[in-house]
Image (tube, helix red, strand yellow):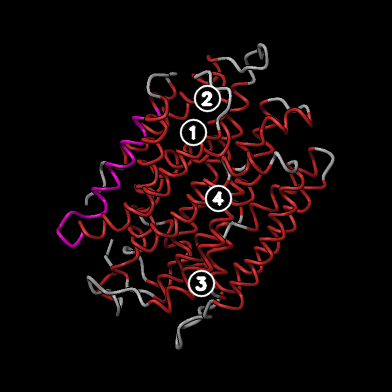
């Protein structure tokens, strides 16, 4: 697969990031991605409230939470076409209105069916938050700084996960989960307006493709061997991390490690994610200029994530905070690097379709894993309000086996 860096007019090592453009492009999209991660992870904190108020079993809790991931994944291929055709500003602003509607519905719903619908609308509405940002970065910034920009963007998501830990626990002392979602819905509308009014539309002279050309581009992405070697490992390793970090971390800490409250450790994990996102992108760009390429970093990060997850799946309870913080750090390195690695291997006009294709796979697996882990855990009886350790072993262990197979395929990809 050809490397397209030479075709990008602004891809010069060491290029500075224009401050005004950074404020007009990066900051609004960062607000959107903050909300995306807040929505994605908030159920880990309110899960016990949902179980208490709605009488959910583990499978139902997994389905309710993973409805976000299903809708998110289902829209990725259309999203890539829309981003490349209409631009990130319009697409994300419109979708965030749908997210606000979903959050409002979630706040007023009285049965699980409407809650699932609301959660799915949220997933649809935030499905463009990262992909639109990456598309805009490819349009407006030097490619030599893409990993740095992606890392900083992902760090804003880490802050969203941080907001979904102790701050949410504190907010629940003032209001309930319904009031919380109503407030977030209002904030989401504000961010939609910010993106639409502040973000520039698209660079002058950028060509628009026909629908046929857009669809041919989708096919070319999925026909590339490098796409599958990189994406499959990212799919099962990062997708599993997302499913666990978005829901099952709190039950695991309670049932396996014996934690009574989890907000503090969730905050530590979110901080580790934020630091990892912000640091790995810049660090990998610096090393790339010294001859150590991004693929080497990716293989190391995914390998570390998989090994630490193996300890969690085995039920290791020694140094639990370090275990989960390390798991978060290794996982962030992979997320920071996959998108720039693949973006460099395809033409710039395919940026939206390449990255949404990756996201499709990751979020499909995150949905399957989040729901499936709950279904497997539910095969064992609940004792005194706690899920069985054997259920965690089985559910996490199945995910680990698939990770090992996909990682072996990644190792065949040349740097």
**Distance CA(mark 3)–CA(mark 1):** 39 Å
Magenta region: which residues?
288-309
Residue 229 placement (x, y as % from top left) = 34, 47
Tell me which corner region of the image, top left, top right, bottom left or bottom right, holds residue 114. top right
What residue does disc 1 label? 265
Residue 29 placement (x, y as % from top left) = 52, 66
The answer to whether mark 4 and mark 1 are in CB contact below 8 A is no
Q: Earlier in the sequence, mark 4 or mark 1?
A: 4
Left or right of 338 on screen, residue 168? right
Residue at the extreme right of the image, as rendered: 110
Identify which residue is drawn at 27% across, 70% down: 5
Q: Earlier in the sequence, mark 3 or mark 1?
A: 3
Q: Nearer the viewer, mark 2 or mark 1?
A: 1
What residue does disc 4 label? 37
What residue does disc 3 label? 84
Left or right of 383 on screen, residue 53? right
**Callout 2: few (<14), some (14-19), or many (20+) C-alpha neighbours within 10 Å?**
some
The answer to whether mark 3 and mark 1 are in CB contact below 8 A is no
What residue does disc 2 label? 253
**Distance CA(mark 4)–CA(mark 1):** 17 Å
Q: Earlier in the sequence, mark 4 or mark 2?
A: 4
Q: Nearer the viewer, mark 4 or mark 3?
A: 4
Q: Earlier in the sequence, mark 3 or mark 2?
A: 3
Q: Main secondary structure of the magenta part?
A: helix
Q: Nearer the viewer, mark 4 or mark 1?
A: 1
Was residue 297 drawn as part of the magenta stretch in this picture?
yes
């Amino acid at each position: 697969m050809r490397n397209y860096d030479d075709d990008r007019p602004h891809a010069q090592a060491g290029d500075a990031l224009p401050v005004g453009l950074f404020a007009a492009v990066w900051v609004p999209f960062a607000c959107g991605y903050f909300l995306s991660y807040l929505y994605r992870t908030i159920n880990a904190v309110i899960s016990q409230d949902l179980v208490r108020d709605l009488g959910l079993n583990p499978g139902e809790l997994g389905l309710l939470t993973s409805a976000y991931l299903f809708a998110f994944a289902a829209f990725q291929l259309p999203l890539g076409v829309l981003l490349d055709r209409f631009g990130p500003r319009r697409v994300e602003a419109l979708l965030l209105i749908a997210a606000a509607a979903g959050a409002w519905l979630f706040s007023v719903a009285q049965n699980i069916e409407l809650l699932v619908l609301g959660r799915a609308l949220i997933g649809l509405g935030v499905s463009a938050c990262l992909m639109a940002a990456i598309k805009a970065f490819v349009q407006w910034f030097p490619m030599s700084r893409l990993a740095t920009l992606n890392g900083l963007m992902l760090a804003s998501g880490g802050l969203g996960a941080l907001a979904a830990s102790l701050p949410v626990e504190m907010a629940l002392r003032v209001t309930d989960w319904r009031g919380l979602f109503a407030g977030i819905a209002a904030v989401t509308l504000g961010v939609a307006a910010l993106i639409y009014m502040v973000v520039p539309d698209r660079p002058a002279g950028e060509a628009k493709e026909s629908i046929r050309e857009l669809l041919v581009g989708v096919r070319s992405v999925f026909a590339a061997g490098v796409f599958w070697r990189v994406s499959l490992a990212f799919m099962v390793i990062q997708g599993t991390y997302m499913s666990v970090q978005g829901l099952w971390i709190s039950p695991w800490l309670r049932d396996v490690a014996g934690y009574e409250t989890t907000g503090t450790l969730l905050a530590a994990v979110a901080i580790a994610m934020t630091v990892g996102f912000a640091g790995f992108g810049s660090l990998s760009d610096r090393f790339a200029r010294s001859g150590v390429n991004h693929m080497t970093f990716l293989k190391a990060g995914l390998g570390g994530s998989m090994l630490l997850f193996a300890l969690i799946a085995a039920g290791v309870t020694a140094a639990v905070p370090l275990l989960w913080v390390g798991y978060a750090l290794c996982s962030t390195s992979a997320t920071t690097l996959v998108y720039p690695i693949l973006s460099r291997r395809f033409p710039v006009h395919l940026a939206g379709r390449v990255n949404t294709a990756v996201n499709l796979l990751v979020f499909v697996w995150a949905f399957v894993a989040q729901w499936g882990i709950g279904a497997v855990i539910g095969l064992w009886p609940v004792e005194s309000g706690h899920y069985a350790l054997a259920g965690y072993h089985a559910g996490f262990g199945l995910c680990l086996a698939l990770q090992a197979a996909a990682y072996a395929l990644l190792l065949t990809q040349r740097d």
